Amino acid sequence: MGRPINKRKIGQGSGKIQATRHFFTGASEATTTAWIVNQRSTNKFTVTDGSTTEVLTLVNQSAGDLSAGEFAIDAVLDDSTVVQVTKLHNRTIQYEKVGPDGETTDDSVDIGKIKYVVGNAGQQDDGVSDTATVDGQ
């Protein structure tokens, strides 16, 4: 599994990573507040919204494309580009940025690894260059 993500960045509360979209089994895709309870493996995390708790898989899917048992986290790069987090590491994220037309061909996909801060992914005002801002509570 490698190094797990920092425990100070998971759980409920300010400064903690938030699931941007989640799809609990037996429900539908939702954007309501949900957070990571713990890390189970490289891409599996226990996620809860306060009433339902389930082990979900972190996937690279846009809004409306999640399947049951999956969740996604958005991040904003310094240039205000929204990307999908594909892996969470202790101090960095791995992300995938799809081309402007939504294609995932080799020449239009940008895969990168960058340091991150937890905040509101709708705002990129962390004051630190070369970082991404992931959705936070």
Image: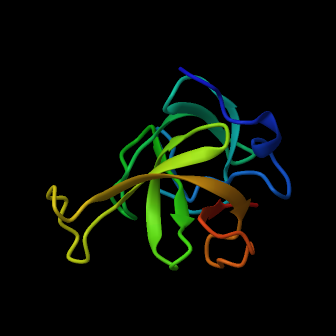
Based on the displayed image, in which of its 4 quarters is residue 45 positioned?
top right
Q: Is residue 101 above or below residue 95?
A: below
What colour scheme was applied to this rendering of the protein?
rainbow
Residue 33 place in picture, x, y as percent: 68, 59
Residue pictured at 72% horizontal, 43% vertical: 51
Q: What count of labels does the image hold?
A: 0
**Residue situated furthest front in the rendering:** 129
Q: In this orientation, does residue 126 appear?
A: yes
Q: Nearer the viewer, residue 4 or 74?
A: 4
Residue pictured at 55% horizontal, 63% vertical: 75
Based on the displayed image, in which of its 4 quarters is residue 59 positioned?
top left
Residue 4 place in picture, x, y as percent: 65, 28
Q: Is residue 20 left or right of residue 127?
A: left
Q: Nearer the viewer, residue 128 or 117?
A: 128
Q: Is residue 135 above or below residue 40?
A: below
Residue pictured at 83% horizontal, 41% vertical: 8
**Residue situated furthest top in the rendering:** 1
Q: Nearer the viewer, residue 18 or 118?
A: 118
Q: Is residue 121 above or below residue 61?
A: below
Residue pictured at 64% horizontal, 62% vertical: 135
Residue 1 place in picture, x, y as percent: 53, 20
Residue 21 place in picture, x, y as percent: 52, 57
Which of the image's four quarters has the C terminus? bottom right
Q: Is residue 37 left or right of residue 115?
A: right
